[in-house]
Image (cartoon, grey):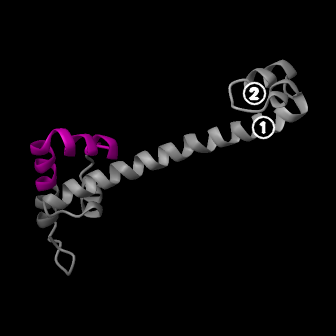
Amino acid sequence: PMPDRHWVLKQARKYRHTFRALKCYRIALPRVERRLQREYIARKEKKRDTRRLWITQVGAGSAEHQVGYGRLISGLRQEDVALNRKMLAVLAQTEPFSFRSICEHVRSTAKLNHNHGPNAL
């Protein structure tokens, strides 16, 4: 179904267009639709970028304690530690001693599991 004419023109007023795009429904409709599509994509990209930032922060924090990011995440998963990437990033920035103890816990459990080989800690 076609969107309401009044709603489309009201949405078009929010954006920067020529005068005709603000008053003419046929010109405003595709512009509003494109804008809504871009906003939808931007919301998804924001989530993606934020997760990427958390991973970078956790990776940098774990590298300080000689634990790789992948080994930290897999070690936490094996130990059933329920900390997500966002919380790990916050801990790495604001609570360095707590984050260090988490890294040490992962390293100690990896050694207890007799993880021998080229990738052992």
| Callout 2 crowding tier (Cα within 10 Å): few <14, some 14–19, many ≥20 | many
**Residue corresponding to mark 2:** 12
Q: Any magenta on residue 18?
A: no
Residue 16, image x, y percentages: 69, 31
- Quarter location, residue 60: bottom left
**Residue corresponding to mark 1:** 31
Question: Could you say which is closer to the camera, residue 8 or residue 78?
Answer: 8
The residue range painted magenta reads 82-105
| Callout 1 crowding tier (Cα within 10 Å): few <14, some 14–19, many ≥20 | some
Mark 2 secondary-structure assignment: helix
- Quarter location, residue 88: top left
**Cβ–Cβ under 8 Å for marks 1 and 2:** yes
Q: From what the image shows, is residue 96 above or below residue 12?
A: below
Residue 84, image x, y percentages: 33, 44
| Residue type marked 1 | Arg
Q: From the viewer's perspective, is 19 left or right of 116?
A: right
| Residue type marked 2 | Ala
Image quadrant occupied by the C terminus = bottom left
Image quadrant occupied by the N terminus = top right
Mark 1 secondary-structure assignment: helix
Q: Hey, which residue is sitting farthest bottom in the picture?
A: 118
Question: Could you say which is closer to the camera, residue 58 or residue 41?
Answer: 41
Question: Could you say which is closer to the camera, residue 78 or residue 93?
Answer: 93
Whether residue 1 appears in this view of the structure is no
Q: From the viewer's perspective, is 41 left or right of 87?
A: right
